[in-house]
Image (cartoon, rainbow, N blue to C red):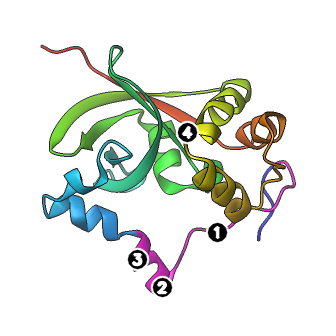
Amino acid sequence: MPPTSTGEPRRKPPTGWRRLVARLPVQLYRAGLGHLFGGRMLLLTHTGRISGQARQVVVEVVAHDPERRCWTVASGYGPQAQWYRNLRHAPGGTVQIGSRRHHVSAYFLDSDEGGELMVQYAPRHPRAARALCRYLGLPSDGTPEGYRAAGRKIPFVRLVAFPDA
């Protein structure tokens, strides 16, 4: 695994047939089957920073605030993930949850907020939290402190829906 900016190992995004499998959720959304993911995954459409073309990725919702109409997602591949870099360049886009679409602005959370998010996420999805840390090569002993430390190393993005016009 290549090191992160903090020297920690981080997996590279998949290539070849693994990339095709990883991109399957995008195809399911395009086929109108986004409802299969419930509220756990969303389709993010954003603008490529180099091409200017629309790009799509399906990411897991780590936290959702229905009153504020915002969804928080994590960049498991770190700040080098293409979608994350694209949002840094142009922090707007569209999210689709099931069949509903919302125009959003992206806000990048600091590492302390990320740590707290991971502490809240882990008890709701313990297997997924353990698997995420293991997959990304992030240390975590399963305690809140361990998840907090891991969450500080994962870039989180809050996607806030524009007010209804």
For this orientation, the residue located farthest to the bottom is: 17
Which of the labelled discs sits on residue 124, or is there none? Answer: 4
Q: Which residue is mark 1?
A: 12
Q: Is residue 52 above or below residue 72?
A: below
Residue type at mark 3: give it.
Answer: Val
Specify which label sits upstream in the sequence, 3 or 2. Answer: 2
Q: Over which residues does the magenta segment extend?
A: 6-22
Q: Secondary structure at mark 3?
A: helix
What residue lies at 65% left-to-right and 60% top-to-bottom?
131
Location of residue 22 in the rendering, given as x and y in whole percent from the top left corner:
43, 70
Which of the labelled discs sits on residue 16, or is there none? Answer: 2
Residue type at mark 2: give it.
Answer: Gly
Q: Secondary structure at mark 1?
A: loop
Mark 3 Cα-neighbour bin, 10 Å: few <14, some 14–19, many ≥20: few
Which of the labelled discs sits on residue 112, or is there none? Answer: none
Which numbered mark, 3 or 2, is in the foreground of this view? 3
Specify which label sits upstream in the sequence, 4 or 2. Answer: 2
Residue type at mark 4: give it.
Answer: Arg
Location of residue 159 in the rendering, given as x and y in whole percent from the top left corner:
41, 30
User: Is disc 1 in contact with disc 2, using a CB cutoff of under 8 Å?
Assistant: no
